Amino acid sequence: MDAKQLFRLYQNKYHLTNWLNENGELAQKEGDVKWSYCGVSKDFKSEIVSQAINNTFTEDELYLCISSNKSSLVLKSIVVDEIGNILHKKEVGIMNKSCTTILFFSQYGTFKSGIIREFPDSRPRPTGIPLKVAFHANMIEKSTKKVAEIISNHFGNLEMELNKDYGGPMEHLWIDVELVSSHDAWPFRFQKRVNNPTSYTEFYSYNVGHYSIKPNFEKLRELSSDEAICSYVFGLLYESTQILIDKQKKLEGFNATAFRLDFLSACKNWGTL
């Protein structure tokens, strides 16, 4: 592997890394990542870097990744000196040959450690894992802001009630309420893997069903009470779940009938229908 190929590999693995917190566990947000100071140039603390490398890696050879023309497999014994010579000019990445562990040094003399994860293109739904349902009303305009606030107050309760194992391949079901008049609702789609921007550690969600509904905006304007708005919107949401019956072939094994019964029961229990 030449320097360019190695640096490209390193960049790819960097973006698949879960960084560690103060306790050596996966940080759940950027602010929890543990950064340590090692300094640069005359302030470079070689003993701190040496200890970090020895604590992180057991291998005798490591990938030293600096740029597309200066990245290579080197002896661990020379890594500290290499970092000290370049750190004030460049960022430096250290990675083991199995591409499972990484140290990243900023050019300002701080560093962090992480675990490189592998995320397959697809996977079967783990047996016994309950369906994770999520409702969203994030896309709004001025006239529908109140509607979004009213219905969003009930989403968490409904999601909790539907957190059950309904069988079949689906792990996630995302249903959006479209509250922008110029936007169209989109039909049901089932995707093996999608980007997951809401999680700092799980970069992808698997086996995701996703669609949206769009209420009648003239009808919404006629509704003045919170109860009337909820009854209308959650009624539309319940009716929309008929699509899960219609998609039984694609969702083979998913008990859409039980899901719809639970949906209706939960809405009645929480007073949204």
Image (cartoon, helix red, strand yellow):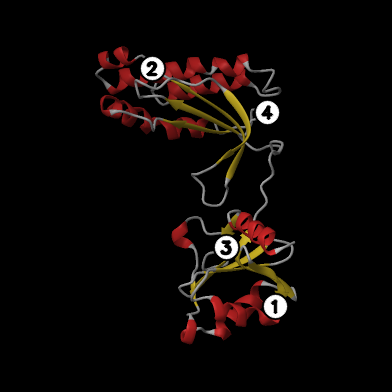
Residue for badge 2: 215
Q: Whole-Å distance between the Cαs marked 2 and 4?
A: 30 Å
What amino acid does circle 2 point to?
Pro
What amino acid does circle 4 point to?
Gly
Q: Whole-Å distance between the Cαs marked 2 and 1?
A: 62 Å
Q: How would you rate the neighbour count of disc 3 (Cα within 10 Å): few for under 14, some for 14-19, many for 20 or more?
A: some
Residue projecting furthest to the front: 69
Q: Position of residue 200 (x, y in %)?
A: 52, 51
Could you tell which of marks 2 and 1 lies nearer the N-terminus? 1
Residue for badge 1: 76
Q: Whole-Å distance between the Cαs marked 4 and 1?
A: 49 Å
Rendered view: 64 above or below 7 = below
Residue for badge 3: 25
Could you tell which of marks 4 and 1 lies nearer the N-terminus? 1
Q: Which mark is residue 167?
A: 4
In the drawing, does residue 49 fall left or right of residue 2? left
What amino acid does circle 3 point to?
Glu
What amino acid does circle 1 point to?
Lys
Indicate the quadrant containing the N terminus: top left, top right, bottom left or bottom right. Answer: bottom right
Q: Describe the element under mark 4 as helix, strand or loop.
A: loop
Q: Position of residue 37 (x, y in %)?
A: 48, 76
User: Viewer-nearest of labels 2 and 1?
Assistant: 1
Q: How would you rate the neighbour count of disc 1 (Cα within 10 Å): few for under 14, some for 14-19, many for 20 or more?
A: many
Q: Are marks 2 and 3 in contact (CB under 8 Å)?
A: no
